Amino acid sequence: MGALLVGIGAFLARTENWRAYAPLAGDPAATGGSHEHEQGHGHKPSGIIRWLTTVDHKDIGVLYGTYGVIAFLWGGVAVLLMRLELTTPTSTLIEPSLYNALLTSHGITMLFLFGTPIIAAFANYFVPLLIGADDMAFPRINAIAFWLLPPGALLIWAGFFTIPLPVDIGPAQTSWTMYAPLSAQQPNPGVDLMMLGLHLTGVSATMGAINFIATIFTERGENVTWANLDIFSWTVLTQSGLILFSFPLLGSALIMLLLDRNFGTTFFAVEGGGPILWQHLFWFFGHPEVYILVLPMMGLVSWILPKFAGRKLFGFKFVVYSTLAIGVLSFGVWAHHMFGSGMDPRIRASFMATSLAIAIPSAVKTFNWITTLWNGRIRLTAPMLFCIGFVSNFVLGGITGVFLAAIPVNLVLHETYYVVGHFHYIVMGMIAFAGFGAIYYWFPIVTGKMYQKTLAKWHFWLSMIGVNITFFSMLLMGYLGMPRRYATYDFNPALAPLASVELLHQVTTFGAFLIGLGTLVWLWNIVQSWAEGPEITDPDPWNTKRDGLHGREFAWFEEQLAADGKLATTDGGEASDASRGSSELRSDGGEADEEQLATDGDAEEQAQPTDD
Amino acid sequence: MSDRIFDRETLLDLTVNVIPLGILVFFVGAYAFIGSFPDDPVIVLIQMSIIVLTGVALSVLTYFSGKAISGAENEMDDYIPAGYSEADAEVAGVPSEPESDASDGAE
Ligand code: HEM
Ligand SMILES: [Cu+2]
């Protein structure tokens, strides 16, 4: 608790600093104008003060990204501990109570502290560049939204910090869904702290969403209209709408739960509103939440994949309209998470109908990506590999979702590892993959450096193989009836094939460690290349100009390079930088071996959009 | 341009959202005519409104976004593809024509 208070104190002190700095930037909250911020950006203080006081969308993007990566690492460590425990049916390594705590922390961390922030990282950095805005509409609200997140994380993880202390506060064991009555009755104050932390992250996400909506509506540059808004900004806009309508609801439900826990109200007690009320409220937020996480990532892939297929995104408008359709439909499907809860079968049937309908726009996007690849001049750079992995994993993740949306199937597979396999194909196989792809793709812009190509490919293949081993065996375990969220599975072998389940658990653990290894490779690559990689002087590191696919963000990068006097004069001959390191340090873009993948005759043809 | 709200091109783009709508309509019909559960007006009202309200919301959003997009399209003289600056588009020799013509016709 003490450490927490010190942390909060430190945070408030920072806020003071930041206020002292703010007058530099005029009063953008009142004017919403963009000229004022330019001055602010002109004189950035240096060192740590810069990062604590920044209102520049790019810096805030980097802050979000760093935060998301830290959360990803913690969530990863938590799950690897759990996977180790699950290699044997009995409890060997950690107490079941610690298992439950890690499970809860893994879920909440990955969804709220990694997923949402990592998207905010890309959106903050690149949406203003892509739409030609000087900055976000409300730069300081942007900073506030970010700075709500660190205290949120401290609160969410608080129960772990207090384990060594002589206080009666432990980590929450509610799982990420916090179902009543369990969550209402566990006396541990760590649960309250976690909910308060969640509340902060919800406020942060809502502020960010309002900011994005305002930015995309009002700050678009000349020539950027609804007809040619880029696909990533479309998905961020839709996601922001989803956040706006769902996160405040989560906030209210959390407050009701806190009241139930601490002030004797009965919102979710059997004699009051009932535990099912919590499920309805939670999933009315929870299903949109999964699309909040996946839509912008679909936007990233729709933006990046065409660059390495040498042609424009096929059926751009289809992708836009199906994004909007997913946005609306995702508010009508929430009870497919509750088919087993005993609600009226007629109402249950309705949620099956809406859930089947939402599969269509999702599938439309998949077909658009595949068609974009068709006859394209494919270049298998690291960002492209992650995009293709994303599409491939979506096929499995999406189809298993449609199966689960069928009531009879759901009643068999609900609460088994099948569900865990389904959504991990999506959250790890798509959301994390798109994140990695985008980090590689924009690495030159953000860091001015190039990453190491060989390591990036190791990262991809370790992750891709790891994901498919891990989560496919989860699907199989689900078919065998292995229930989710158990620390042990020492059941009677007469009930289910214990030996197969144990083997599959071990395979799953193996796969999880492959993913972990890949992530370490990635971390090393990013850190080392950022610190000592070759500087980028070519404004077109991906050779997209010749296809007419050079985006606004790289045009901005070109201006930056020119302003700094770093622009390579003629073609992108980076040979000078290659002297710095071994061949490993070479850039990923436009190299001979990749060029050769293309059949030259075709290439020219594909560059020109065909007319009929 | 004709006096219709959507030209043919836009209508074609909008079909993508008509399919999920069609699925919703199908289920409304199926549940209304071949449902085997006993009638309870309140439950049936809830049952139908979940599907119908979702469908209505989808139609409304599709309509307004379609209008905004095709309206913006008609006002533009030079079409710059989504996400690219004018200079870029010129350097790259991207033709100034609506995206849908270029990409949908690419087969
Ligand atoms: C193709 C569209 C999809 C359909 C039809 C679908 C359907 C379902 C269904 C029916 C369940 C409930 C399974 C059960 O608990 O018995 C479920 C669970 C889940 N889905 Fe999906 N899904 C789809 C896409 C997605 C996407 C895109 C994401 C993530 C971005 C996602 C994330 C999840 C999560 C996190 C859960 C488990 C929640 C929990 O109980 O902890 N799904 N899905
Ligand atoms: Cu769902």
Image (cartoon, rainbow, N blue to C red):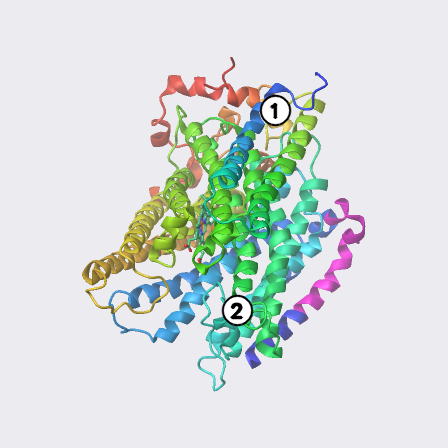
Pinpoint residue A351: horizontal percent, then vertical percent.
50, 48
Residue indicated by mark 2: A156
Q: Is residue B97 left or right of residue A424?
A: right
Taking A82 as reference, is A600 above or below it? above
Q: Amino acid at mark 2?
A: Ile
> Does the stretch in magenta take in A176?
no
> Front-most of B82 and A535?
B82
Q: Is residue A135 visible?
A: no
Most distant residue in the bottom direction: A166
Q: Secondary structure at mark 1?
A: helix
Distance from label 2 to label 1 (Cα)? 47 Å
The tag on residue A86 is: none
Taking B12 as reference, is A128 above or below it? below
Quadrant the N terminus of chain B occupies: top right
Q: Disc 1: which chain?
A: B
- Residue at x 67% of width, y 41% of height: A216
Q: Is residue A132 visible?
A: yes
Q: Which marked residue is nearer to the observer: mark 2 or mark 1?
A: 1
Q: Amino acid at mark 1?
A: Thr
Pinpoint residue A324: horizontal percent, then vertical percent.
58, 39
Taking A123 as reference, is A93 above or below it? below
Q: Is residue B10 left or right of residue B27?
A: right
Residue indicated by mark 1: B10
Taking A580 as reference, is A524 above or below it? below
Which span is picked out in magenta? A13-37
Q: Please identify the dominant SS of the magenta region.
A: helix
Pinpoint residue A120: horizontal percent, then vertical percent.
57, 51
Whether marks 2 and 1 lie on the same chain = no
- Residue at x 40% of width, y 61% of height: A76
